[in-house]
């Protein structure tokens, strides 16, 4: 077997097409669009190259057939926020062979070591963690857009190599055909009656305002999380540009207290229900197929990608009010049967509690692993988002 770096069109095509071998006969697999995957490793398209670097490798068997792939990357903004400088690996695909997997992991590791790294997380994305993040270990059903899917034997390949459990990611499913718990609605109605609060959905005509509101809430809601990095206007604009063709206005909600943005929820249609039929291509024929399946209302589920509430407004029921408005809006989208709430890490107990309160059922479990290159180093799990973030913010405001 032999490792080769991806450095031309031929090796890039092999990197993309190895999934044909790995997922042959797997009805749940949805091939990511080739253009999207190539864009992640294109310095002209992926803004993470402004503060990082990436490499790709494929593995050939003794007959020259591609049997695996892996990507490795260093995000300089995050790498040095840990006890050991930490890079990442992702987009791993491999036959069920530990020796082959080890060669791929070694290729990523050696590249990272050359870049000054002392550990690697995986499988992760060279981008934000709302896409292609974590190894699926439970709930092997068709993935929603952006969610990681892989064969079940990958867990053994990772753990046998030396990857250790860094954090767990749970995805829950909300069946829109079932009523929300009565207690949840009572809280929502109570909040809705408060005159200082209002909830409204996103509107393209006022996109800049909502972008700024989202950044403000995100900044405060996530600032106490490990290695937090604030969003920039450029980040949000790029995400909006990438979603504008399928973003639905009343799938994105904002809550305000006396005109101050205090919470948001971002939900997207599950485009994978159409992408599944495109075999990774985005040519004229696939575009025609896309329009065909969209008109047939093939999409019957949505994915809540992220939700944030400013700490001083947490525990006040504002999340319930947002879900109340969202549920009312779904009457206009009768083809939708399910909403996937993905994903919530075990480092975020408050959001996990919210998922339980809306009556969502367990759907999937992913694990993000970390591998320390020096076995003598002390391994530590991901830190928990402080439960007292509200108290911290209130105390800080009193001192200012």
Image (cartoon, rainbow, N blue to C red):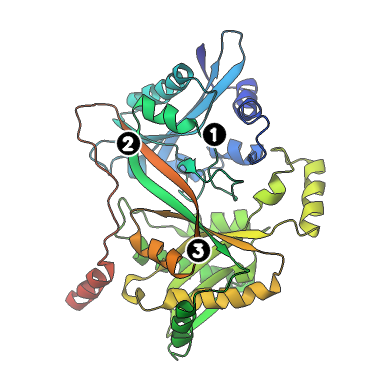
In the image, residue 65 above or below residue 191: above
**At numbered mark 1, what does the secondary structure look like: helix, strand or loop?**
loop
Q: Earlier in the sequence, mark 1 or mark 3?
A: 1
Separation of marks 1 and 2 at Cα, in angstroms: 26 Å
Closest to the observer, 106 or 211: 106
Rendering quarter of residue 283: top right
Separation of marks 1 and 3 at Cα, in angstroms: 25 Å
**At numbered mark 2, what does the secondary structure look like: helix, strand or loop?**
strand
Separation of marks 3 and 2 at Cα, in angstroms: 34 Å
Where is residue 96 shown, x and y percent of the image? 52, 23
In the image, residue 383 above or below residue 267: above
Q: Is residue 97 visible?
A: yes
Rendering quarter of residue 260: bottom left
What residue would you read off at disc 1?
Answer: 151
State the mark number for residue 260. Answer: none
Q: Is residue 215 visible?
A: no
Rendering quarter of residue 75: top left
What residue would you read off at disc 3?
Answer: 360
**At numbered mark 3, what does the secondary structure look like: helix, strand or loop?**
loop
Please report contact status of discs 1 and 2: CB closer than 8 Å, yes or no. Answer: no
Where is residue 47 shown, x and y percent of the image? 49, 45
Please tell me which residue is depicted at 20% across the width and 31% down the height of the picture.
377
Please report contact status of discs 1 and 3: CB closer than 8 Å, yes or no. Answer: no
Q: Nearer the viewer, mark 3 or mark 2?
A: 3
Where is residue 301 shown, x and y percent of the image? 64, 59
What residue would you read off at disc 2?
Answer: 86
Please tell me which residue is depicted at 26% across the width and 42% down the height of the picture.
82
Q: Nearer the viewer, mark 1 or mark 2?
A: 1
């Amino acid at each position: 077997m032999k490792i080769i770096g991806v450095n031309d069109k031929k090796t890039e095509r092999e990197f993309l097409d190895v999934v044909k071998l790995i997922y042959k006969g797997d009805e749940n697999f949805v091939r990511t669009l080739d253009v999207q995957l190539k864009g992640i490793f294109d310095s002209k398209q992926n803004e993470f190259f402004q503060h990082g670097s990436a490499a790709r490798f494929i593995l050939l068997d003794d007959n020259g057939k591609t049997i695996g792939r892996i990507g490795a990357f260093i995000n300089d903004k995050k790498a040095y926020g840990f006890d050991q400088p930490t890079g990442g690996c992702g987009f791993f695909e491999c036959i069920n062979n530990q020796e082959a997997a080890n060669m791929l992991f070694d290729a990523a590791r050696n590249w990272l070591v050359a870049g000054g790294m002392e550990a690697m997380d995986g499988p992760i994305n060279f981008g934000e963690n709302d896409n292609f993040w974590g190894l699926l270990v439970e709930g092997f059903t068709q993935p929603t857009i952006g969610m990681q899917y892989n064969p079940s034997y990958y867990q053994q390949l990772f753990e046998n190599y030396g990857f250790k459990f860094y954090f767990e990611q749970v995805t829950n499913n909300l069946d829109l055909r079932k009523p929300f718990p009565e207690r949840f609605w009572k809280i929502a109605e109570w909040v809705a009656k408060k005159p200082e609060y209002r909830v409204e959905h996103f509107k393209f005509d006022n996109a800049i305002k909502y972008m700024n509101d989202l950044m403000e809430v995100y900044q405060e809601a996530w600032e106490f999380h490990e290695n937090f990095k604030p969003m920039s206007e450029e980040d949000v604009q790029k995400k909006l540009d990438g979603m504008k063709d399928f973003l639905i206005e009343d799938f994105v909600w904002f809550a305000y207290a006396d005109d101050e943005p205090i919470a948001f929820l971002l939900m997207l249609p599950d485009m994978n229900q159409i992408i599944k039929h495109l075999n990774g291509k985005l040519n004229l024929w696939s575009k025609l197929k896309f329009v065909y399946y969209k008109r047939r209302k093939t999409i019957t589920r949505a994915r809540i990608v992220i939700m944030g509430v400013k700490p001083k407004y947490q525990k006040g029921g504002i999340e319930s009010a947002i879900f109340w408005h969202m549920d009312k809006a779904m009457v206009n989208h009768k083809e939708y049967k399910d909403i996937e709430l993905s994903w919530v890490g075990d480092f975020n107990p408050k959001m996990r509690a919210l998922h339980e309160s809306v009556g969502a059922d367990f759907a999937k479990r992913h694990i993000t692993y970390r591998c320390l290159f020096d076995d003598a180093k002390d391994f530590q799990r991901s830190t928990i988002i402080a439960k007292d973030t509200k108290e911290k913010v209130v105390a800080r405001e009193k001192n200012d």
